[in-house]
Image (cartoon, helix red, strand yellow):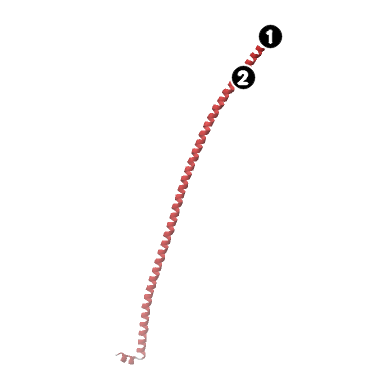
């Protein structure tokens, strides 16, 4: 009986091992199911993160494009402003030169007019001086002068 008892004991141990193995398999299946759920969840999270990254990259690209267009606009505005300043400076210089030339022409004209007037006044002065001398001579010696004249 000892062999039979040993066999029974071994069968009982094998049954116990089979039950333990079955429990381990059930736990492994549960763990596999949970791991599968975790993998699916991770895939969804990765997909969401990828979508967010793509949106962020697109936003960065949009911002870069906008900044670049603003920079180009700024450069164009700056060039236009520089051009306007240069044009205004040139026009101011031209206007200043024209004004100076007009003033010089006016001064020359006034000088000419004054010279003419002074010349006329000098003629009159000499005529008056000459006439005064003749009148003075006539008054001082009227008889001799009249006779010399006629």
Q: Which of marks 1 and 2 is in front?
A: 1
Please state the horizontal and vertical placement of residue 91, each as a whole percent of the image.
Answer: 41, 59
Between 58 and 93, the one nearer to me in the picture: 58
Q: Answer few, some or many: residues within 10 Å of disc 2's Cα (few below 14, many 20 plus, some between 14 and 19).
A: few
- Give the image quarter of residue 38: top right
Q: Answer few, some or many: residues within 10 Å of disc 1's Cα (few below 14, many 20 plus, some between 14 and 19).
A: few
Please state the horizontal and vertical placement of residue 10, each as a whole percent of the image.
Answer: 66, 12
**Residue 24's disc number:** 2
Name the residue tied to disc 1: 3
Residue furthest to the left: 150
The quadrant of the image that shows the N terminus is: top right
Residue furthest to the top: 1
Q: In this view, does 100 lie above or below 58?
A: below
Please state the horizontal and vertical placement of residue 2, each as a whole percent of the image.
Answer: 70, 8
Residue at 64% x, 16% y is 17
Which of the marked residues, 1 or 2, is nearer the chain's N terminus? 1
Residue 2 appears left or right of 114: right
Residue at 40% x, 66% y is 101
The quadrant of the image that shows the C terminus is: bottom left
Residue 124 appears left or right of 11: left
Q: How many marks?
A: 2
Residue at 60% x, 19% y is 25
Residue 32 appears left or right of 143: right
Q: Distance between the residues labelled 1 and 2?
A: 30 Å
Between 129 and 9, the one nearer to me in the picture: 9
Callout 1 touching callout 2 (CB < 8 Å)? no
Residue at 37% x, 84% y is 129
Secondary structure at badge 1 equals helix
């Amino acid at each position: 009986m000892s062999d039979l008892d040993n066999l029974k004991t071994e069968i009982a141990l094998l049954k116990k091992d089979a039950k333990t193995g079955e429990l381990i398999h059930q736990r492994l299946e549960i763990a596999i199911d949970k791991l599968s759920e975790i993998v699916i969840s991770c895939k969804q999270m990765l997909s969401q993160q990828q979508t967010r990254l793509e949106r962020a990259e697109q936003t960065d690209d949009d911002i870069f494009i906008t900044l670049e267009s603003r920079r180009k606009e700024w450069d164009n505005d700056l060039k236009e402003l520089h051009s306007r300043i240069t044009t205004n400076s040139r026009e101011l210089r031209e206007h200043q030169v024209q004004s100076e030339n007009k003033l010089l022409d006016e001064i020359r004209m006034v000088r000419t007019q004054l010279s003419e007037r002074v010349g006329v006044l000098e003629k009159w002065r000499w005529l008056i001086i000459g006439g005064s001398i003749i009148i003075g001579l006539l008054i001082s010696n009227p008889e001799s002068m009249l006779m010399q004249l006629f």
